[in-house]
Image (cartoon, grey):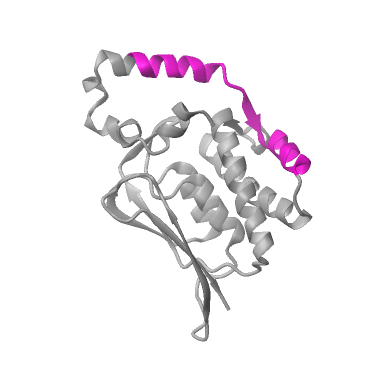
Amino acid sequence: MDKEHDGHDHDMEYLYGHLKGEEHQNHEEQEHHHHEEESHAHHHHRGIKEIFEIIDDAKMTDNARAIAKKIFNVLAIAESKAHEVPVEEVHFHEVGAIDSIVDIVAIAVCIDNLGITEVVVPKLYDGKGTVRTQHGILPVPVPAVKHIVEDADIKLDIIDINGELVTPTGAATVAALRTKESLSEQSKILKVGYGNGKREYGLPGVLKASIIE
């Protein structure tokens, strides 16, 4: 992914600056966004069929491939509901599609490689307010996330933070992988991993995952 678009993933002013009012943007910011929208218009969009073909062509085990497709399918169904179009007409913007393919395939390969068969997720936590997306400014939780958690019966708590803590890709991953929502009291933690986010919300931006026996 190019640096310009990658930067927007954790550029708080870009994602949430509209909370101050779009009318306060200076001319330079407006010009930047105008050129960006023009460049976006020329980008290719990938449908779910094309994404599945990319996954089919990638070198990975059949199990990892099945996991990746399952996550993408959850994501596509949620986006189809959010935008009221058939699943086969759901299109991911090229930058978002590449980002999601990399994230989802990496997750699928890791889950397969680690031999994980059960995934426990008690609940998810999201923020509030609004966020700038490729579909415009949307309320948080964004519609796709709402559809995913409702369809998969995942508990979603809203905490007092302005910002998007759960993305559609993250929610789809949980929905596709989760097999239960509570641990047995006899569980033993074997390994713990942490992933640190780049955005600053005033609370630790850390995802913790444990391998449990």
Task: Report if residue 127 is visible in the image.
Answer: yes
At x 50% / y 66%, what residue is drawn? 121
In front here: 147 or 106?
Answer: 106
Q: Which x, y percent locates residue 209?
A: 49, 64
Q: Residue furthest bottom?
A: 186
Q: Main secondary structure of the magenta part?
A: helix
At x 32% / y 37%, what residue is drawn? 12
78 is within the stretch colored magenta? no
At x 56% / y 38%, what residue is drawn? 99
Q: Which x, y percent locates residue 11?
A: 35, 35
At x 66% / y 32%, what residue is drawn? 47
Question: Looking at the picture, does residue 10 appear above or below residue 211?
Answer: above
Q: Which x, y percent locates residue 24?
A: 21, 22
Q: Quadrant of residue 43?
A: top right
Q: Is residue 6 left or right of residue 172?
A: left
Quarter holding the N terminus is top right
Q: Which residues are magenta?
A: 31-58
